[in-house]
Image: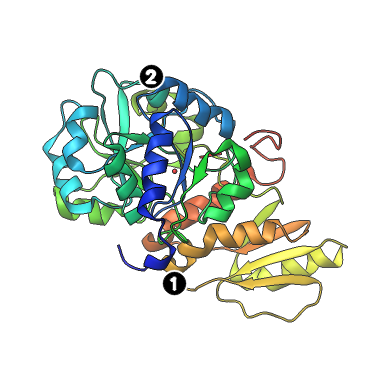
Amino acid sequence: MTGTDPALQPAADDIRRAAELLRAGELVGMPTETVYGLAADALNVEAVGKIFSAKGRPADHPLIVHLPDAGHLTRWARAIPKEAIALANAFWPGPMTLILKREEGVPDAVTGGQDTVGLRVPDHPVALALLRAFDSGIAAPSANRFGRISPTTAAHVREELGDKVALVLDGGPCQVGIESTILDLSRDAPVILRPGAISADDIARVIGRRPATRTAHAEEGAAAAESEQPRVSGSLAAHYAPRTPLQLIPAARLVEEAATLAGEGSRVAVLARTCPDPRDARLTWHNAPVDPSGFAHELYANLRELDACGADFIVVEALPDTPEWHAIADRLGRAAVGSGDGGVPVDEHDET
């Protein structure tokens, strides 16, 4: 993985201590290339229960299990298709989660009682060092309250969860910045259940066929489709959400609509991409990177900053409707649905 400052990495003693805490059933904040995870021993049902308690996460929501390497696949999954091996060889370590038939012994607490399990090998030196020291699977959803903005720094984890976490390993800001692609390979045809940095085209180049993509409509209302596809992390219509109400506005109307809101006496925070700052004192204006990877890298940190600035509304410039933006647009769309009081109870608690 590129871009990780060695000076920011925890010492070997911290890695050993984190592994010991996991063996003792405690929770650890773990950096990955996507977002920071709330790590627990995936085979320890009591420890996994602490994840759900700390996050306020519904017990039927499955967790992703992080592995030291692809050689651990057979400990967690059975009937592994050749396509899974090819994708693991191509993209692990990396931001891809594979949904496979679970092996006997994988706890129901991890799988949400389903016959499948989500597995990945993260591409972060600290996560890999911890996984190798622990030498088993680590369940690690995002280290935040359920439904809220995912953490991309160690400070975000401490702010969000405080003393619910025994130790937070600081691996610097996450390089990717949004959660992994989730690909279901447990049925006849591959299906992307959550978009991420690895696209349908990337997958097709490896396995020779293009996966289908589960739509938001199917997630919200198609009971038949839901019964055929596994439940996965981050698939709720409302997720990744700030407490401040968030609206997505096309670039051509961004300044006008932000100013209209401000003119009604509201405090307005703006996350723009291509629109220049109009220097309106009524607006808290923030320009994000114009490219997809840069925008994704900073997305959650930007949303957290704007959520904390005391605004009544957050207005975000809508993204282009092109494949390279689809995963980021997915996160922003869910954030808009879940923001404020919409979709995610304010007194409830979030999810990698």
The image quadrant of residue 81 is top left
Q: Residue at x 69, y 47 (%)?
A: 243
Residue 93 lies, in percent from the top left, at 26, 51
First in residue order: circle 2 vs circle 1: 2
Above or below residue 251? Residue 54 is above
Q: Secondary structure at mark 1?
A: loop
Q: Secondary structure at mark 2?
A: helix
| Residue pointed to by mark 1 | 291
Above or below residue 266? Residue 285 is below
Q: Residue at x 25, y 56 (%)?
A: 201
Give yes or no for contact between labels 2 and 1 (Cβ–Cβ under 8 Å).
Answer: no
| Residue pointed to by mark 2 | 108
Q: Depth check: 340 or 131 in front?
A: 131
Q: Tell me the quadrant of the picture where the C terminus can be found.
A: top left
Query: Is the image coloured rainbow, by chain, by secondary structure, or in one colour?
Result: rainbow
Q: Tell me the quadrant of the picture where the N terminus can be found.
A: bottom left
Residue 262 lies, in percent from the top left, at 82, 66
Please identify, in this view, whether the residue under mark 2 or under mark 1 is nearer the observer: 2
Q: Residue at x 50, y 43 (%)?
A: 167
Residue 63 lies, in percent from the top left, at 41, 32
